[in-house]
Image (cartoon, rainbow, N blue to C red):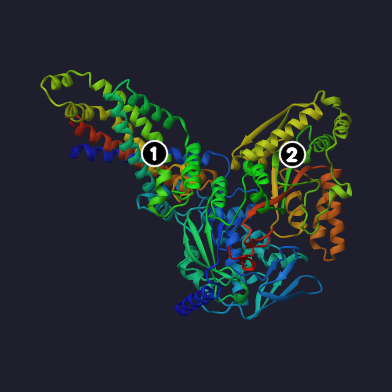
């Protein structure tokens, strides 16, 4: 196990290298630069700005300098937000997104798995149709429609929650539901499908024949194995929602990192593009590692040698 | 020292609370995180709005008349040749740390803006100061060679390299505002953070939670604090217009700009329609023609297209914000604006004239006319306008128009390198003088002249107008320039002049600033 984890961590090096090179090349290949504006600046002014941010260095040097900074956790200045460094932006904005992501993921996990479980156990019953109906709705309604709808019902009409902004636990509820619903729906559908397959396996029949209680069979023997496919998608999903949802953060005016994934590209804010992309890559790799570890816990047949 | 002022501030607040029973708070939406609160660096309206409340300029603008009025400078004078400008500053302005605001800090600020190491985007507006361009462009100039000098603690003198009647507007711009030298030097880029910043305006920065909110408190050290009525300004940073609209309706915001899709509802609902305010803004929306790209190298073709745009219908059915049809470039409210509609300059919507122009150009009823590319940057609003205008072209002129859109910076690069036959662009005032428009945009040497408009007579007119000091002569020169640009040569088709579309709660007593940021210090909040 230890050796496995070390090996996976070492794999990070080539992954980060490849992701950083691709991102760096792509962002410089796109036309337009950080100082292009509706009011075109004189070339002399652009030269001053390029010199200030070392954008007049050869590209290979810019890359090497950036990566040298990256390994020392110095992510450079933001070109669009001149008084802040990328470290500042990540330190101030990412925890907000992480908090929203955790809440959404909890809703997805603790809502989705029970829904799927009920559906599978009571297959073709009213409960099954109801929970699959909810899942279908959750998957089909996009965030940009669900968010305003929840605001209209629960903030404007019922006045239970604030319309938008951030700052207290009550501010987390509506955006977390908006962001978590689609994930909840896919977890529910996957849990159901996986459970239906597992409960037809021989070892479940064996357990039943031995007289094990129905709930024990379902929760201990069936669900545990049924969760393997769920954990496979849970990892990347978690990485996704932990690194930001531009749309939900925008609708609810949440000071998260999601916006920077989009605006940094529009602004050609090179250091922010690099940092947000690499953080996302790191999150995906890390979550996939956790998923692999969780396989071993869920299914004793899986070993790491 | 800081503590004393903090105590003073708390005392003022307490007195305020006792006197009025409540702290008057304005809930405002900045619309986004201000990219920088450093006046030497800022280029965007959000940052400039906050800086307007935090930092005083030598001059300011009157919201009603757009005239340049005194702020830090009580009066100023120009030498007879128009090259030397002397500003006499008030001696009772002080910083929030208790030190006086002096002419030396103005000199420092101007030189810091021009220092190439600062990387200020707006430094070029100061190039009319003697030695400024040489220092800024590293062409052998030095900071000492720049024509700005504190004659004494409260007198600052500028030497220009050419006469510029509009210089008092420039002197009040954010790039010239005095800075707290020791704080800037001590904290570097982080001097604008709430815990470091020292300011001299009517408000001071109490709290800045990035991307979330900002709180401004009435500054106890502001020289005219007795007349500031609103105690604090709570600034949200809500980017989504529909969210801001919902917060406005829920009573969380005192003012907002309604999104386009809500305009019909706002006009129909009695409560909202009473709170709606539409006023001219200082921006022009236009379609440029690439004057070098066939068949738009023919002025008759450009005139045909300019005459085929039904501006009023576009405003009534697509924009819905009470905008004004434009036939000239410089917008109303700017010195040098020419009313093209009244004076018959430029081309109004006239389908028959449009067809005739096209026929005269050799394309009767559009026959033989090549396909046209109309390009805009990706945005729902621009897309709606482009569809409407393209349909006008196709219906009136019987030509085929392809609408293409590109992401903003890609679009700018396209326009700069090889603009399409028709491109969308807008221009907003930096200072209220036509020099900022006809000279800075369509002079053949300008970087924003994506139309590749090149008429030596036009260049001569706008360059002469810049140097001329007699206002009557300048007005006449700008009229001639607009006539060449929008009529004789028809290099562009101005479409409309922007409006400010705003909803404000009835208990807010306010002004509207078309330029340089709102004057919150002049506002009030009535009991409600």
Pinpoint the chain carrying mark 1. Answer: A
Q: Is residue B175 above or below residue A146?
A: below
Label at residue A180:
1
Query: Residue A190, position in %: x, y?
Result: 33, 27
A215, B306: nearer the viewer: A215
Whether residue B212 is visible to the viewer of this picture, yes or no, is yes
Query: Residue B270, position in %: x, y?
Result: 66, 48
* Residue that label 2 marks: B314
Q: Is residue B281 above or below residue B108?
A: above
Query: Residue B467, position in %: x, y?
Result: 80, 62
Q: Point out the image quarter for the C terminus of chain A.
A: top left
Element carrying mark 2: helix
Query: Residue A164, position in %: x, y?
Result: 48, 49
Asked whether, in this view, residue A212 is left or right of residue B412, the answer is: left
B132, A58: nearer the viewer: B132
Quarter of the figure with residue A276: top left
Asked whether, in this view, residue B482 is left or right of residue B186, the answer is: right
């Amino acid at each position: 196990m230890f050796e496995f984890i070390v090996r996976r961590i070492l794999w990070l090096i080539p992954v980060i290298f490849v992701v950083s090179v691709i991102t760096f090349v792509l962002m410089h290949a796109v036309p337009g630069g950080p100082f292009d504006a509706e009011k075109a600046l004189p070339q002399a002014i652009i030269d001053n700005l390029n010199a200030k941010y070392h954008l007049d260095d050869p590209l290979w040097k810019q890359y090497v300098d950036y990566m040298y900074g990256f390994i020392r956790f110095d992510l450079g200045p933001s070109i669009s937000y001149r008084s802040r460094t990328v470290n500042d932006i990540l330190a101030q904005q990412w925890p907000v997104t992480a908090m929203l992501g955790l809440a959404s993921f909890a809703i997805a996990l603790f809502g989705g798995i029970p829904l799927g479980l009920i559906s599978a156990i009571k297959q073709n019953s009213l409960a099954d149709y109801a929970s699959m109906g909810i899942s279908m709705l959750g998957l089909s309604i996009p965030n940009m429609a669900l968010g305003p709808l929840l605001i209209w019902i629960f903030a404007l009409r019922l006045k239970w929650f604030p319309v938008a902004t951030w700052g207290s636990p009550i501010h987390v509820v509506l955006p977390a539901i908006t962001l978590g619903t689609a994930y909840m729906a896919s977890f529910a559908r996957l849990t159901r499908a996986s459970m239906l397959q597992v409960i037809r396996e021989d070892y479940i029949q064996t357990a039943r024949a031995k007289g094990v209680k129905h709930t024990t069979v379902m929760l201990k023997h069936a669900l545990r194995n049924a969760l393997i496919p769920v954990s496979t998608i849970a990892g990347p999903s978690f990485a996704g929602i932990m690194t930001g949802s531009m749309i939900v953060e925008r609708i609810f005016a949440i000071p998260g990192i999601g916006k920077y994934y989009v605006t940094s590209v529009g602004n050609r804010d090179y250091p922010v593009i690099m940092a947000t992309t690499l953080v996302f890559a790191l999150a995906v790799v890390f979550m996939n590692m956790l998923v692999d570890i969780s396989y071993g816990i869920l299914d004793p047949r899986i070993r790491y040698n | 020292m800081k503590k004393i002022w903090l105590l003073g501030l708390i005392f003022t607040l307490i007195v305020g609370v006792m006197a009025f029973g409540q702290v008057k708070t304005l809930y405002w939406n900045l619309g986004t995180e201000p990219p920088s609160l450093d006046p030497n660096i800022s280029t965007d309206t959000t940052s400039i709005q906050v800086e307007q409340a935090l930092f005083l300029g030598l001059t300011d603008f009157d919201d009603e008349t757009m005239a340049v009025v005194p702020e830090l400078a009580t009066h100023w004078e120009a030498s007879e040749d128009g090259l030397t400008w002397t500003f006499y500053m008030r001696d009772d302005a002080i910083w929030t740390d208790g030190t006086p605001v002096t002419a030396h800090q103005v000199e420092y600020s101007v030189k810091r803006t021009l220092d190439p190491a600062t990387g200020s985007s707006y430094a070029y507006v100061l190039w009319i100061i003697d030695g400024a361009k040489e220092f800024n462009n590293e062409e052998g100039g030095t900071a000492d060679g720049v024509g700005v000098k504190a004659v004494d603690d409260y007198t600052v003198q500028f030497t220009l390299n050419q006469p510029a009647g509009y210089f008092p507007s420039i002197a009040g711009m954010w790039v010239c505002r005095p800075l707290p030298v020791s704080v800037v030097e001590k904290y570097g880029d982080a001097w604008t953070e709430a815990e470091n910043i020292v300011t001299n305006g009517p408000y001071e920065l109490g709290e800045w939670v990035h991307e979330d909110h900002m709180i401004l408190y009435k500054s106890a050290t502001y020289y005219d604090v007795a007349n500031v009525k609103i105690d604090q300004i709570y600034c949200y940073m809500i980017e989504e217009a529909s969210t801001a609209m919902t917060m406005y309706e829920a009573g969380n915001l005192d003012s907002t700009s309604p999104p386009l899709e809500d305009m019909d509802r706002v006009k129909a609902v009695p409560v909202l329609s009473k709170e709606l305010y539409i006023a001219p803004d200082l921006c022009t929306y236009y379609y440029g023609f690439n004057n070098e790209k066939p068949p738009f190298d023919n002025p008759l073709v450009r005139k045909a297209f300019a005459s085929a745009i039904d501006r009023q219908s576009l405003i009534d059915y697509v924009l819905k914000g009470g905008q004004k049809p434009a036939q000239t470039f410089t917008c109303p409210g700017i010195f040098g604006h020419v009313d093209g509609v009244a004076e018959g300059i430029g081309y109004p919507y006239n389908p028959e004239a449009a067809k005739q122009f096209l026929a005269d150009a050799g394309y009767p009823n559009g026959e033989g006319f090549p396909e046209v590319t109309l390009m805009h940057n990706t945005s729902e609003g621009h897309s709606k306008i482009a569809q409407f205008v393209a349909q006008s072209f196709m219906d009136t002129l019987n030509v085929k128009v392809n609408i293409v859109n590109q992401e903003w910076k890609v679009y700018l690069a396209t326009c700069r390198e090889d603009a399409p036959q028709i491109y969308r662009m807008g221009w907003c005032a930096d200072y209220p003088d036509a020099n900022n428009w006809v000279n800075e945009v369509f002079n053949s040497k300008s970087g924003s002249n994506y139309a590749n408009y090149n008429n030596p007579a036009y260049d001569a007119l706008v360059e002469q107008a810049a140097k001329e000091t007699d206002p009557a002569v300048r007005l006449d020169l700008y009229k001639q320039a607009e006539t060449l640009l929008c009529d004789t040569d028809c290099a562009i088709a101005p479409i409309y002049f922007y409006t400010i579309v705003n909803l404000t709660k009835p208990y807010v007593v306010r002004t509207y600033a078309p330029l340089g940021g709102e004057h919150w210090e002049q506002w009030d909040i009535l009991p409600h």
